[in-house]
Structures are given as structure tokens and as C-alpha cells.
Image (tube, rainbow, N blue to C red):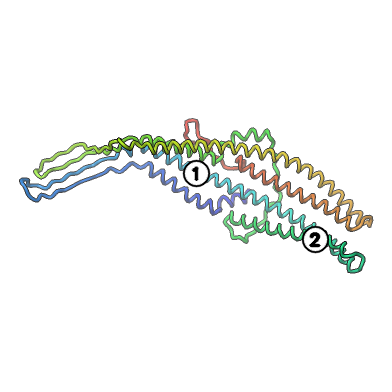
């Protein structure tokens, strides 16, 4: 499974595209940190007529002070947003890892189920062959052989349905790994079921949940929005261009000095932008709380379901052992001629049906194990939480 996960993280097409898009956010950090360019202006007036005797010209150089005032907040917002994009990418990798694990589990357990169904089908086919031969000899009537034919047909249908499911899962696996849809490779069928007890879950839950990338992305998104709100508040500072000019008139009188261009904040004091940024910040705060509460609820529900599955698994394991002992005794009795062929097949089918139920429960437990590991980040790369001062390590 670890090999499949590594291939998925490295070659998944969606992750490749996400990593390429990540560069955009980091380029925006560079852009946000650049100083605004100074503004240069000039004019030249050709002397045409009149009492003067020279051409006039004027030169000016200025700098946008408002852009300097908001630069720090804008740069910090871009940096936190880049960290948010990184965490979103990591969360997407978590989802790919979880899906790869789940497909590995499904394919491994489906192959086990197919083996059991094949044995059941062969057993029923052999019983039908015997009953059909007896029908041809006149030892049985058609009504006695019909159930055998129906049972074999039902088992053929189950096998056909399972083969289509296996093919669909393989195509999902190939798409996840960026492979051609007909690629097949061997999978390890022995996937252990880990027993996560309640005490262990209660111990690791407070530590792992805050480190989940989606929650880290929301925290960094909130920090980015905090800086955007600060930039909007600083944006109340009126647009100010400060600089100097130098020039000469048509009489060659030279002059120079400071020059200021200032907006008068009478109508627009950036109230709308501030209100929008504050509302967005509140929305992100509520979304984080909701996501954290939902994750805790999902973990609790999975733990409750896991307790029930473990109980059913233990009961089915005991029933399977009893059914196998009965099947072994039936086989010995059938060889000795002490029971008829129908009773022998029925007892064998009981054991095979219990085996199928055991595989179903084992698969359900593994699927839940994968889901819980993805939810809690067990075996996943993690993001360190923000420090107390809001800075990310």
C-alpha cells in the first residue's frame, strides 16, 4: 500500500496541475513586496511669440505614499495566502493518499471475495452437474434439479457483477496514478486491521486535528484576510503623491520645489472595502469553527461504528470457525458415504457464506480505518499550527 501511495502522490494528474498552480500564489508574494515605481512627468513649451525669448519646460518626480502605507499589509496578506495555497495542496495530497489506500483495500478484498465466490460457484456447478445427470437417467425429476440450476445462475451473476466492479476499481486506480486504463499490477492482499481504542483516539485527536491541512489552510486564510482588512483600514489614508518639480518659464526664470497631489476624502473613505473585508474575515472564522466541530463529530461517529464492527467481526469469526469444522466433518462423512451429496454441499455453502460475510466485514473495517486515518492524519505529512502570535513557523 505504501508503494501505491507514493506513486499516487508523485504521478496523480490533478496533483501535478495543483503544484503548477501553486507557483502563481508565490509569484503574487513577490509582486506584493515590490516597491511602487516613482512617477516622472515633464512638459516642454516652444516659444512662438510675445515679449519673452526662450522655450519653457517643467520636470517633476513623485512617489505614491499611499502605496507605501499599505505595502506591508498587502505583502503579509499575500504571504499568508501562499501558505494557505500550500496547505490546500497538502490537503489535496491527503485526499489522493486516502483514495489510493481505499482502492488498494477494495481491490485486495474484492480479489479475496472473487476466490470465495469462485469456489462456491464450482461447488454449485458440480451439484447441478450431478443432479442433471440424475435427471437424464430418470432418477430425479425436473423440479428437483431446478433449484440447483437457479443457485448456479445466481452465483454466476454475483461473479459477473464482482468482475465489473473490480474492473471499475482498476480503472479508478489507473486514473489516480496517471496510467493507461488497462494497466494491472499485483497488490499485497495481507492488509492488517489496526485496533484503535477509544483512549488512544481521545489522546491523539486534540493534537492531530489542528494540524490537518484543511484547517491549517483556513487559519492561514484567516490571517491573510486579517492583513487585507488592515490594508483596507490603511486605505483610508488619502491618495498622496509627494515629489518635487523643476522648470523654467519663457523668460528663463528657473524655479523648483516640492509638489503634493492629495485626494480629499469627503465622499469615499474606503468604508465599503473595510466592511467587505471584515465580513469576509468573520465568515472565515465561522467556517473554521464549523469545520473543526464537524471533524470532531465525524471522528466520534467513526469510533462508535468501529466498536460495532469489531463486535460483529469477532462474532462472525467465531461462526466461521464453527462452520468450517462442520464443513470438514461433512466432507469426511460424504467420502465415507454417510451423508448425501446435497447435505454435503449445503454445509460447505454455509462455511463459504460465512467466509464471504467475514470478507465483507474485514473490508468495511479497512475502509473505515482508511477514512479515520485520513480524517485524523495518521501516517500523513502534517502542517505545524500557527504560533501564539499568529506567525507560522
Of 82 and 145, which appears nearest the observer? 145
Seen in the image, is 147 located left or right of residue 101? right
Tell me what residue is drawn at x 59 percent, y 60 percent. 180
Mark 2, Cα crowd under 10 Å, few <14 / some 14-19 / many 20+, is: many
What number is the disc on residue 323? none
Q: Is residue 132 left or right of residue 277?
A: right
Residue 228 appears left or right of 150:
left
Instruction: Point out the frontmost of discs 2 and 1.
Output: 2
| Residue 190 drawn at (x, y percent) | 71, 49
Location of mark 1 (residue) = 86
Pointer 2: what residue?
A: 152
| Residue at x 15% of width, y 46% of height | 57
Q: Marks 2/1: CA distance?
A: 55 Å
Residue 314 at x, y = what percent?
77, 42
Find the residue positioned furthest to the left: 51
Most foreground residue, 294 or 338 = 294
Neighbor class of circle 1 (other Cα within 10 Å; few <14, some 14-19, many 20+) is many
Q: Does dot 2 land on a helix, a strand or a loop?
A: helix
Viewer-proximal residue among 180 and 145: 145
Where on the picture, by quarter, is residue 195? top right
Residue 302 percent across, percent down from the top left: 66, 40
Residue 42, position as x, y percentages in the image? 20, 46
**Going 50% across and 52% down the picture, which residue do you hit?**
17
Amino acid at each position: 500500500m505504501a508503494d501505491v501511495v507514493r506513486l499516487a502522490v508523485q504521478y496523480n494528474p490533478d496533483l501535478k496541475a495543483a503544484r503548477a498552480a501553486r507557483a502563481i500564489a508565490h509569484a503574487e508574494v513577490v509582486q506584493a513586496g515590490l516597491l511602487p515605481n516613482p512617477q516622472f512627468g515633464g512638459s516642454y513649451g516652444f516659444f512662438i511669440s510675445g515679449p519673452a525669448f526662450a522655450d519653457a519646460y517643467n520636470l517633476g518626480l513623485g512617489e505614491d505614499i499611499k502605496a507605501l502605507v499599505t505595502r506591508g499589509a498587502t505583502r503579509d496578506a499575500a504571504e499568508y495566502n501562499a501558505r494557505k495555497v500550500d496547505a490546500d495542496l497538502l490537503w489535496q495530497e491527503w485526499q489522493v493518499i486516502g483514495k489510493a489506500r481505499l482502492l488498494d483495500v477494495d481491490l485486495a478484498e474484492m480479489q479475496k471475495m472473487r476466490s470465495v465466490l469462485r469456489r462456491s460457484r464450482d461447488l454449485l456447478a458440480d451439484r447441478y452437474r450431478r443432479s442433471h445427470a440424475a435427471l437424464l437417467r430418470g432418477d430425479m425429476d425436473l423440479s428437483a434439479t431446478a433449484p440447483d440450476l437457479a443457485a448456479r445462475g445466481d452465483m454466476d451473476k454475483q461473479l459477473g457483477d464482482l468482475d465489473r466492479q473490480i474492473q471499475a476499481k482498476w480503472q479508478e486506480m489507473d486514473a489516480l496514478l496517471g496510467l493507461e486504463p488497462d494497466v494491472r499490477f499485483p497488490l499485497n492482499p495481507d492488509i492488517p486491521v489496526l485496533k484503535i481504542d477509544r483512549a488512544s483516539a481521545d489522546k491523539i485527536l486534540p493534537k492531530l486535528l489542528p494540524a490537518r491541512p484543511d484547517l491549517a489552510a483556513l487559519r492561514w486564510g484567516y490571517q491573510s484576510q486579517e492583513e487585507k482588512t488592515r490594508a483596507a483600514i490603511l486605505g483610508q489614508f488619502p491618495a498622496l503623491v509627494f515629489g518635487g518639480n523643476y522648470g523654467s518659464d519663457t523668460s528663463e526664470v528657473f524655479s523648483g520645489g516640492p509638489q503634493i497631489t492629495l485626494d480629499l476624502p469627503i465622499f469615499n473613505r474606503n468604508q465599503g472595502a473595510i466592511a467587505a473585508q471584515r465580513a469576509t474575515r468573520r465568515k472565515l472564522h465561522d467556517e473554521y469553527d464549523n469545520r473543526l466541530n464537524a471533524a470532531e463529530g465525524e471522528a466520534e461517529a467513526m469510533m462508535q461504528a468501529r466498536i460495532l464492527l469489531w463486535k460483529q467481526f469477532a462474532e462472525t469469526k467465531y461462526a466461521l470457525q464453527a462452520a468450517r469444522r462442520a464443513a470438514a466433518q461433512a466432507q469426511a462423512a460424504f467420502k465415507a458415504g454417510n451423508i448425501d451429496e446435497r447435505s454435503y454441499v449445503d454445509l460447505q455453502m454455509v462455511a463459504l457464506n460465512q467466509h464471504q460475510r467475514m470478507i465483507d466485514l474485514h473490508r468495511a473495517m479497512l475502509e473505515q480505518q482508511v477514512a479515520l486515518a485520513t480524517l485524523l492524519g495518521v501516517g500523513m505529512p502534517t502542517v505545524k499550527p500557527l504560533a501564539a502570535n499568529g506567525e507560522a513557523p
